[in-house]
Image: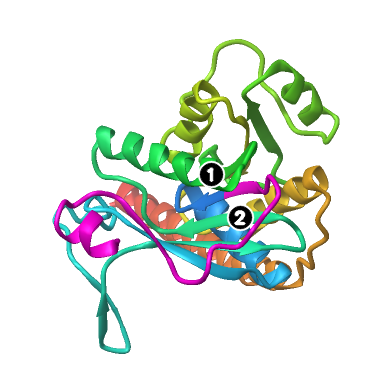
Amino acid sequence: MFKDDFLKHTRIAITYRTDKPVMDEPIFIEGLSGLGNVGMIAASHLIRSIGAKKLADVYSPYFIRPGIPIPGIMYTDGVAELPKDEIYYDLEQNLIIILGFYQGSTPNSYFRLANSILDFCDDFGVKQIFTLGGYGTGQYHEAPAVHGVATTHELVERLKKYDVLVESGQKGPITGISGLLLGVGKERGFEGICLLGETYGEFPDPKSAKAVLTTLCRIIGVDVDTGELDKEIELLEDEIQKRAMIIKDQMEEKARSDDLSYIC
């Protein structure tokens, strides 16, 4: 199947790495790379916390690294492999989770990937989809809020009960797969919720990921230990303080230099 669908025809291919499990209307969660890698960090921690198992790999001829317009390979310990996203599952929690760095490289390829994922969801009887991502603000947040968007007014009201911020009026866009799974999914009959954590956006943000993951788990009724994320948050805040001191020193040095220039 992989060779037929991908190598010969360069189509998007979802290749199973284990026997297909029998699941009863599982919840599908998307955590692909994006602003602050919020969704990917949250999904990765969820997978580790519940002990989810590898289900499938997702390949696409449109998977390329950001900023690198030419397709290529990745390698681990010298071993080559095609770029891919990964899908995990957990029978006890009844969850399917997609995780990875890659989305698309053309507008059409994003829609093709979204429809391929939704076909996969159809095959498992998924009714509800959660997409996770970052809400870029350009500043660091001590207590990042979680913003939400959903496919129905009823789901929006449900989000408000979990202290999720819902903006009034026309807003957007939510770009990439996080948005398209909701938009295309709505047209195909799926219920969808997008949770976005406030983030600076320029560096990985475990604090925002924790806020998103905690909200998600409250909504779907799953318990997770966020201890690992707390450690990552401490490291991040130490790094932010170091950068702040460097910037402060640079500004003070510039101010002293400006004063000397004026005296001369």
Give the number of the disc on residue 96.
Answer: 2
In the image, is 97 to the left or to the right of 25?
left
The amino acid type, in three-letter code, at marker 2 is: Ile
Question: What sort of colour scheme is used for the picture?
Answer: rainbow
Q: Is residue 165 visible?
A: yes
Give the number of the disc on residue 121.
Answer: 1
In the image, is 10 to the left or to the right of 74?
left
Answer above or below: position of 41 versus 112: below
In the image, is 106 to the left or to the right of 146?
left
In the rendered image, residue 8 lying in the magenta stretch gets the answer: yes
- Near mark 1 (Cα within 10 A), the count class, few <14, some 14-19 or many ≥20, is many
The amino acid type, in three-letter code, at marker 1 is: Cys
In the image, is 250 to the left or to the right of 50?
left
Give the number of the disc on residue 14.
Answer: none
Q: Nearer the viewer, residue 74 or 36?
A: 74
Q: Position of residue 1 (x, y in %)?
A: 30, 61
Answer above or below: position of 253 versus 196: below
Tell me whether circle 1 and circle 2 mark residues in contact (CB < 8 Å).
Answer: yes
Q: Residue furthest top?
A: 169
Quadrant of the image occupied by residue 164:
top right
Residue at the spot 83% in from the left edge and 36% down from the top edge: 162
- Near mark 2 (Cα within 10 A), the count class, few <14, some 14-19 or many ≥20, is many
Residue at the spot 26% in from the left edge and 33% down from the top edge: 108
Q: Which SS class for mark 2? A: strand
In the rendered image, residue 141 lying in the magenta stretch gets the answer: no
Q: Nearer the viewer, residue 166 or 18?
A: 18
Answer above or below: position of 130 versus 78: above
Q: Nearer the viewer, residue 228 or 4?
A: 4
Q: Position of residue 93 (x, y in %)?
A: 76, 59
Q: CA distance from mark 1 to mark 2?
A: 9 Å
Bounds of the magenta span?
1-29
